[in-house]
Image (cartoon, rainbow, N blue to C red):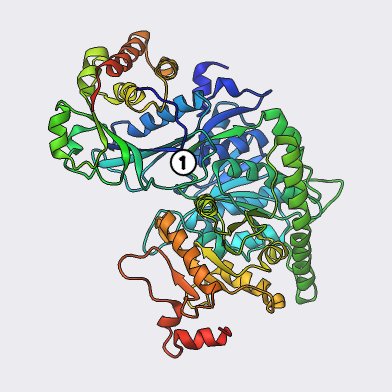
């Protein structure tokens, strides 16, 4: 490999850290995803670029042009067409990947359901970004949270390393015959897509070997086993097909754990459905997902040094929702905050809050009081002080302070944001607290 | 003044869009990676207009870096364009034991009068002149890296020279490569600080 070629791969290599064919390199999140795709080398990449994930498509195109991928890139005129081409290629038995963000994902919407309903294990990287309006290009989980019921498995990456690792595992998980579902790998816009970090990149052969070849079980192009895709499904069958999707999602729980454990055994970085941090003897904890989990872990470390029994629980998957793992981690705690980087106007709290609270309902006698803190919308900076404040509120909540608001945005300009309760005309904060038995 | 970095150091670059500060931040990160450190390099996330004030960031640590996002309090501030002194708050959110390094024709004493410092060190270097002398271009980033090695100890001079040689060899003829190496060495010698 010449020096010029090496620079085209956007790799900066630390010569000291060559372990077999692995290497420690500096890559942005987008570059790491593109390199994982280069190593997996799917058959087809239909794409339409959008900030902040544009660089994924650009880099994949560069790899193809330089002969480093055999993949067929299909440049289309919109995200709707990109996902449609993905569905067509996957139905034809191809291994397919693409990337998008925000309004691009929104424009894919109806086709997302066709991919999952047809059991097509497409892998889609999302550079999480706020949906307009107002127009905003920055990190926000709104678009992927909005599509959480579209039947796709969803991973949220904490770091560039994990985004790379998640892409590689996504193919194995989605293509598993017990699952056969499409997979979204989310990485926070700019915070991960445009941040260069050192990561361990596995050797090309290691990745090829881990992912294995793809043989679609039901391909349109397999004359020995003729099948149809995209047929009209009458009321007499539709519900059974929906049930099959759920069965795949339920099986995905064990497949994600299996693949994550095998990945750890082979490459030294194991993964599960959740990532508990200092939870064993924690009294209060924050639940979070995505790149800001690292900040929360850092605050936990500092508070632990001062003798505070605090912990963090990062959700790696949102679909399937790891309810059992969450409940197991939360029972016995004194107070918990769910931090959402998205919100649902008119709903009682943001998506993860709703689902965590629902998961705890069967254990309501021993479940801790929980609050929702909505942060980081449209890329709003989260600060260590915001996280420390939330832990302070949890202390108050654990002491029975009924004035701690249940749902509130953090990090707003000026005065503290009104709570959801305060914005509600008929109920005072005290009435809501009384309902919660405090 | 070389010292071993024992904790995570956070760097904030002040530059103007188009001056190559993001590339310089990535070069600093790549140099630190050569020394086995954990690194981050990222630009400020915002609309970019050529010539507009821009910020970029580094984190360099002996341990894995978990935090993401804008640096809250910098240990090292690097001002690549001297016209930013007094124009943007380069002296805000700097750690009390931090250092500000500026490309400027002014002396340390003169720059001190422009900034509000609370015990932070100040280092000055006419990096643009060094760049013009050594490789005939008004590109102060390479000499600034040499000064960073001297003033902060974030990376060693030797490692930096290897990195600069490798990066520049990919794109430029030997004369330019040599000029940049000379610029790093001269900056390392000439930077003045107190």
**x and y percentages locating residue B56 in the rendered image:** 35, 39
Residue drawn at 74 percent across, 68 percent down = A242
In the picture as drawn, the residue positioned furthest to the bottom comes out as: A426
SS assignment at label 1: loop
**x and y percentages locating residue A157 in the rendered image:** 58, 49
Q: Is residue A220 visible?
A: no
Residue nearest the observer in this picture, A227 or A54: A54
Above or below, B188 against B104 in this view is above
User: What crowding class fits label 1: few (fewer than 14 Cα within 10 Å), some (14-19), or many (20 or more)?
Assistant: many
Left or right: where does residue B161 sit relative to residue A147?
left
In the picture as drawn, the residue positioned furthest to the front comes out as: A307
Residue nearest the observer in this picture, B45 or A273: A273
Quadrant in the picture for the N terminus of chain A: top right
**x and y percentages locating residue A10 in the rendered image:** 50, 29
Q: Which residue is mark 1?
A: A195
**x and y percentages locating residue B18 in the rendered image:** 29, 34
Residue nearest the observer in this picture, A349 or B156: B156
Quarter of the image where one finds residue B102: top left
Quadrant in the picture for the C terminus of chain A: bottom right
Left or right: where does residue A379 sit relative to residue B126?
right
Above or below, A165 against A272 in this view is above
Instruction: Count all numbered tags in the image, as a single digit.
Output: 1
Residue drawn at 72 percent across, 47 percent down = A92
Q: Which chain is home to disc 1? A: A
Above or below, B101 against A179 in this view is above
Residue drawn at 29 percent across, 21 percent down = B143
Q: Is residue A87 visible?
A: yes
Residue drawn at 39 percent across, 64 percent down = A133
């Amino acid at each position: 490999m010449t020096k010029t070629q090496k620079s085209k791969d956007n790799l900066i290599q630390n010569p000291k850290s060559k372990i077999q064919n692995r290497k420690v390199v500096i890559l942005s999140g987008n570059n790491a995803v593109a390199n994982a795709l280069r190593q997996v080398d799917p058959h087809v990449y239909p794409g339409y670029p959008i900030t902040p994930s544009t660089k994924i498509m650009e880099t994949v195109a560069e790899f193809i042009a330089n002969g480093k991928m055999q993949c067929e890139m299909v440049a289309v005129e919109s995200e709707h067409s990109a996902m449609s081409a993905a569905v067509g290629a996957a139905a034809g038995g191809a291994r397919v990947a693409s990337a998008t963000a925000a309004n691009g994902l929104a424009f894919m919407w109806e086709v997302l359901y066709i991919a999952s309903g047809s059991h097509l294990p497409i892998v889609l990287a999302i550079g999480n970004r706020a949906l307009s309006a107002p127009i905003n290009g920055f990190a926000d989980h709104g678009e992927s949270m909005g599509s959480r019921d579209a039947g796709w498995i969803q991973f949220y990456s904490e770091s560039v390393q994990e985004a790379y690792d998640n892409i590689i595992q996504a193919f194995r998980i989605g293509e598993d015959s017990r699952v056969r579902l499409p997979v979204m790998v989310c990485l926070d816009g700019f915070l991960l897509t445009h941040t260069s970090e050192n990561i361990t990149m596995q050797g090309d052969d290691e990745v090829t070997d881990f992912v294995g070849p793809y043989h679609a079980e039901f391909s349109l192009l397999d004359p020995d086993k003729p099948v149809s895709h995209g047929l009209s499904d009458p009321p007499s069958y539709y519900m059974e097909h929906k049930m099959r999707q759920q069965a795949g999602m339920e099986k995905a729980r064990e497949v994600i754990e299996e693949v994550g454990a095998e990945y750890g055994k082979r490459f030294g970085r194991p993964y599960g459905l959740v990532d508990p941090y200092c939870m064993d003897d924690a009294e209060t904890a924050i639940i979070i997902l995505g790149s800001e989990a690292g900040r929360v872990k850092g605050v936990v470390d500092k508070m632990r040094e001062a003798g505070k029994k605090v912990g963090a629980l990062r959700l790696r998957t949102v679909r399937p929702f790891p309810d059992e793992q969450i409940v197991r981690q939360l029972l016995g705690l004194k107070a918990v905050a769910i931090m959402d980087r998205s919100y649902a106007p008119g709903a009682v709290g943001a998506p993860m809050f709703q689902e965590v609270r629902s998961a705890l309902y069967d254990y309501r006698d021993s479940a801790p009081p929980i609050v929702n803190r909505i942060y980081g919308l449209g890329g709003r900076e989260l600060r260590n002080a915001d996280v420390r404040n939330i832990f302070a509120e949890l202390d108050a909540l654990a002491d029975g302070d009924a004035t701690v608001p249940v749902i509130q945005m953090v990090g707003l300009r000026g005065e503290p944001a009104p709570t959801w309760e305060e914005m509600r005309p008929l109920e005072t904060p005290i009435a809501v607290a009384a309902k919660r038995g405090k | 003044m070389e010292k071993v970095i024992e904790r995570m150091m956070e760097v904030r670059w002040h530059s103007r869009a188009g001056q190559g500060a993001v590339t310089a931040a990535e070069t600093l990160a790549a140099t630190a990676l050569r020394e086995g450190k954990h690194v981050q390099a990222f630009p400020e996330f915002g609309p970019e207009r050529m010539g507009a004030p821009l910020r970029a960031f580094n984190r360099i640590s002996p341990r894995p870096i978990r935090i993401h996002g804008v640096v809250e309090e910098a240990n090292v501030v690097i001002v690549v364009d001297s016209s930013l002194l007094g124009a943007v708050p380069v002296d805000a959110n700097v750690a009390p034991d931090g250092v500000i390094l500026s490309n400027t024709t002014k002396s340390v004493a003169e720059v001190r009068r422009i900034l509000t410092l609370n015990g932070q060190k100040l280092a000055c270097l006419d990096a643009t002149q060094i760049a013009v002398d050594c490789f005939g271009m008004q590109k102060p980033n390479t000499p600034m890296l040499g000064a960073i090695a001297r003033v902060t100890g974030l990376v060693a001079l030797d490692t930096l020279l290897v990195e600069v040689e490798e990066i520049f060899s990919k794109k430029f003829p030997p004369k330019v490569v040599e000029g940049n190496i000379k610029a790093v060495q001269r900056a390392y010698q000439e930077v003045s600080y107190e």
